[in-house]
């Protein structure tokens, strides 16, 4: 583990793309699924009309080595009679040897400051672990009566208001960029081969089981700490999990 006392926050830039793809791959590999597709997601985001480079940031050391990166895309909340433009961040990652030093938090807080200052977007909507993002001011989407397009309130759906009272409508539906769906239908191996990523072993990990358990929870389920999630997973069979004989 390396300690980084001074680093700069700058805008995402094309000359850093290659480095950031390596960081996304390194940080997410085998974390939520065997392998990962966050580096492919990052490539698609930057090719998309939904990409917001003005809020997408990198943390750089004095040698211009990338330590972390956060990418933003346009999203929206649709109400019956109007629409509120929103933004979504993700993926966000810090290179593993510099994790735990607040670099990711700084990328999030500095980008949110820029969004508030611009005053163009109503807020930030994300899918992620609630215990990670509450400290940045995120609330479960149910606080704003906002759901996924199918009307569900998944546990990970969280909203931060960046313009006061703009989310006071009723029964809003959140639509994120279609890049997140597009990535599901792409050939990850072809992408890895094309960009000459070195082969890496894929395997299942406890963090993947926690993730697949958590994403099935609704906001009406009680809030659990990581330890409580592990505990309830041990007592309760995972939904849709394939049991080993």
Image (cartoon, rainbow, N blue to C red):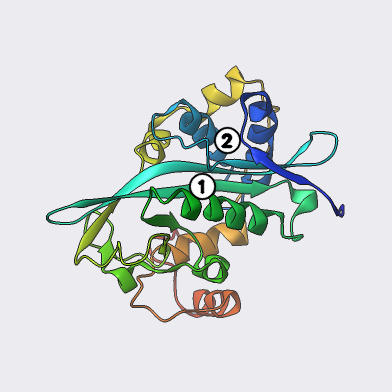
Q: Is residue 102 visible?
A: yes
Q: Is residue 20 left or right of residue 98?
A: left
- Picture coordinates of residue 62 (x, y %)? 85, 38
Q: Give 156 or 186, whichever is nearer the viewer.
A: 156
Residue 7 - label: none
Whether pointer 2 and pointer 1 mark residues with C-beta atoms closer than 8 Å, the reply is no
Q: Assess disc 1: are there few (<14), some (14-19) or many (≥20) residues with their C-alpha within 10 Å of its C-alpha.
A: some
Give the residue drawn at x 44%, y 72%: 237
User: Looking at the image, which residue is at 37% across and 78% down?
Assistant: 221
Q: Nearer the viewer, residue 29 or 11?
A: 11
Relative to the observer, which residue lies in front, 106 or 23? Answer: 106
Measuring from the top left, give residue 235's x and y in whole percent. Answer: 50, 80
- Which numbered dot is residue 90? 1
Residue receiving disc 2: 39
Please report whichever mark, 2 or 1, sits nearer to the chain's N-terminal start: 2
- At 41% from the left and 51% from the top, the residue drawn is 119
Give the residue displayed 61% in from the left and 42% down from the top. 57
Please say if 126 is above or below 169.
Answer: above
Dot 2: what SS? Answer: helix
Residue 63 image offset from top left, x and y in percent:
85, 34
């Amino acid at each position: 583990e390396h300690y980084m006392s001074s680093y700069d926050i700058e805008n995402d830039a094309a000359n850093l793309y290659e480095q950031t793809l390596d960081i996304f791959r390194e940080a997410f590999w085998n974390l939520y699924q065997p392998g990962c597709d966050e580096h492919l997601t990052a490539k698609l985001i930057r090719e998309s009309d939904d990409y917001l480079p003005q809020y997408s940031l990198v943390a750089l050391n004095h040698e211009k080595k990338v330590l972390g990166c956060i990418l933003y895309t346009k999203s929206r909340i649709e109400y019956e009679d109007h629409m509120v433009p929103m933004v979504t961040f993700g993926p966000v990652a810090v290179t593993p040897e510099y994790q735990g030093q607040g670099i990711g938090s700084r990328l999030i807080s500095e980008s949110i400051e820029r969004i508030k200052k611009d005053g163009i977007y109503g807020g930030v909507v994300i899918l992620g672990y609630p215990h990670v993002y509450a400290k940045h001011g995120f609330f479960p989407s149910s606080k704003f009566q906002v759901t996924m397009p199918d009307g569900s309130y998944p546990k990970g759906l969280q909203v931060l208001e960046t313009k006061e009272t703009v989310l006071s409508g009723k029964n809003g539906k959140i639509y994120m960029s279609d890049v997140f769906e597009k990535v599901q239908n792409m050939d990850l191996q072809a992408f890895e081969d094309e960009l000459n990523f070195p082969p890496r072993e894929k395997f299942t990990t406890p963090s993947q089981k926690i993730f697949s358990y958590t994403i099935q929870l609704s906001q009406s389920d009680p809030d659990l700490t990581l330890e409580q999630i592990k505990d309830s997973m041990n007592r309760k069979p995972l939904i849709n999990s394939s049991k080993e004989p």
